Amino acid sequence: MRLSVRLAKETIDGISELKQNLENESTYSGLRITNGFVVGIAYEETKDFANDTWGEVIRTKRIPKNNVDKKSLEIKTNLVLSQDVVDGINELKKILPNYLPEVSYVTTSYVIRVMVRAALLKRERKIG
């Protein structure tokens, strides 16, 4: 399923960092790794998190390895995602507002940002 979203610079940098990690793994060597594939991997690596782990991910600040360029803070992109990933994103859209008392809903791009951050934190062994 093609999903057209505006992703924050932090999300793009996180996807890029996760993509580099995946390219270094023998499982994915020689494959063309797309941003949609990386988001799918982030979902797979975090889908079994307990609900309270998401609160911890939201509270945990993570500085991207690359400096954030202030010139382009949002990038519109198309992601090709499986239906399972889209369904998972929709479920997280219901769960995450519980950990953000100042909001009543979250956007798809925010959910993707949190999923990518969670996958990176998990790989760095800083979380669940």
Image: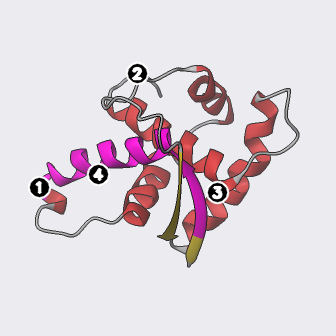
Q: Which residues are magenta?
A: 4-26
Dot 1: few (<14), some (14–19), or many (≥20) neighbours within 10 Å? few
Mark 4 / mark 2, whichever is N-terminal:
4
Q: From mark 4 to mark 2, how far is it between C-alphas?
A: 19 Å
Q: Nearer the viewer, residue 88 or 35?
A: 35
Dot 4: few (<14), some (14–19), or many (≥20) neighbours within 10 Å? some
> Looking at the picture, which amino acid does disc 1 mark?
Ser
Is residue 105 found left or right of 64 in the rendered image? Answer: right
Is residue 17 found left or right of 114 in the rendered image? Answer: left
Disc 1 vs disc 4: which is toward the camera? Answer: 4
Q: Residue 39's quadrant in the figure?
A: bottom left
Q: From mark 3 to mark 1, how far is it between C-alphas?
A: 28 Å
Q: Is residue 61 above or below residue 97?
A: above
Q: From mark 1 to mark 4, how far is it between C-alphas?
A: 13 Å
Dot 3: few (<14), some (14–19), or many (≥20) neighbours within 10 Å? many
Q: Residue at x 61, y 66 (%)?
A: 86
Q: Residue at x 66, y 27 (%)?
A: 55
Circle 4 is placed at which residue position?
Answer: 19
Question: Is residue 22 highlighted in magenta?
Answer: yes
Q: From mark 3 to mark 4, how far is it between C-alphas?
A: 20 Å
Q: Residue furthest front?
A: 71
Mark 3 / mark 1, whichever is N-terminal:
1
Q: Are the residues tagged 2 and 1 within 8 Å (C-beta)?
A: no
Circle 2 is placed at which residue position?
Answer: 126
Q: Residue 54's quadrant in the figure?
A: top right
> Looking at the picture, which amino acid does disc 3 mark?
Ile
Circle 3 is placed at which residue position?
Answer: 89
Mark 2 / mark 1, whichever is N-terminal:
1
Q: Which numbered circle lies on residue 26?
A: 1
Q: Nearer the viewer, residue 69 or 61?
A: 69
Q: From mark 2 to mark 1, how far is it between C-alphas?
A: 23 Å
